[in-house]
Amino acid sequence: MSDTVLRPFAWSDVPAITRIYRHYVDHTAITFDTEAPDETAIAEKYAALTRLGHPLIIAERAGQVLGYAYASYYRPRAAYRFTCEDSLYLDPNETGKGLGRVLLTELLAQSKAFGFKQMLAVITADTANSIAIHEKFGFERVGYYKAVGYKFDRWHDIVHLQMAL
Ligand SMILES: CC(C)(COP(=O)(O)OP(=O)(O)OC[C@H]1O[C@@H](n2cnc3c(N)ncnc32)[C@H](O)[C@@H]1OP(=O)(O)O)[C@@H](O)C(=O)NCCC(=O)NCCS
């Protein structure tokens, strides 16, 4: 972990982010996207995040993107502007090694500095490690929604966890 660097997003990260995210779209119900976005769609999404100035962090080792994290508005309507939702995605070869903890620590710090007051994590209910990492950071379970996603021929529940920043 000592050779891992955290840095802001750069446009050259788009191919790596696309590759990592497509893996989770194609093979898991961790994200409710069902069509894997291409690099153009990812670039558009990150352009919007960049314009908003929201925290967008890349974890890198020896020039290789290992994962990324960002916080963005939980909902677009203006009264939600102090409430963010987090997203953390590690290269599948980099999970289970403590990198999620490093990225979430920095994301919480940058989200607080940005001015967000509450962070929500919206997690597919059977994603045990993602729920576990958030609870270890002090997030509280505040909501459970049954059968709100349909992917890979079955219904998925989601959990909402929340932390005041
Ligand atoms: C979720 C994710 C960010 C977590 O990061 P990570 O570095 O892989 O974290 P780990 O799997 O090592 O687990 C984090 C903690 O939960 C614990 N944990 C893992 N699986 C667990 C389980 N089934 N039950 C209880 N605790 C568990 C780990 O022991 C670890 O605790 P520690 O830090 O005290 O050792 C990463 O696995 C990932 O990118 N997953 C795919 C995408 C995803 O699910 N993103 C979240 C959607 S927002």
Image (cartoon, grey):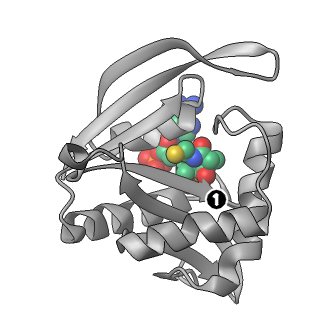
Residue visible at 37% across and 68% down? 54
Left or right of 160 in this view: 44: right
**Does the closest atom of ligand 1 sit within 8 Å of the Cβ of label 1?**
yes
Q: Residue 129: percent from the left, percent from the top? A: 55, 38
Q: Quadrant of ligand 1?
A: top right
Image quarter of the N terminus: bottom right
Residue 67 visible, this angle: no
The amino acid on which the numbered mark 1 sits, given as a three-letter code, is Leu
Where is residue 138 drawn, in percent x and y?
26, 41
- Residue at figure coordinates x 23%, y 45% from the top left: 80
Q: Is residue 2 left or right of residue 55?
A: right
Q: Residue at x 44, y 24 (%)?
A: 159
Q: Secondary structure at mark 1?
A: strand
> Where in the figure is residue 21, as x and y percent of width and height?
71, 55
Question: Is 32 situated above or below 126?
Answer: below
- The answer to whether residue 2 is above or below residue 135 is below
Q: Which residue is mark 1?
A: 90
Q: Residue at x 45, y 58 (%)?
A: 101
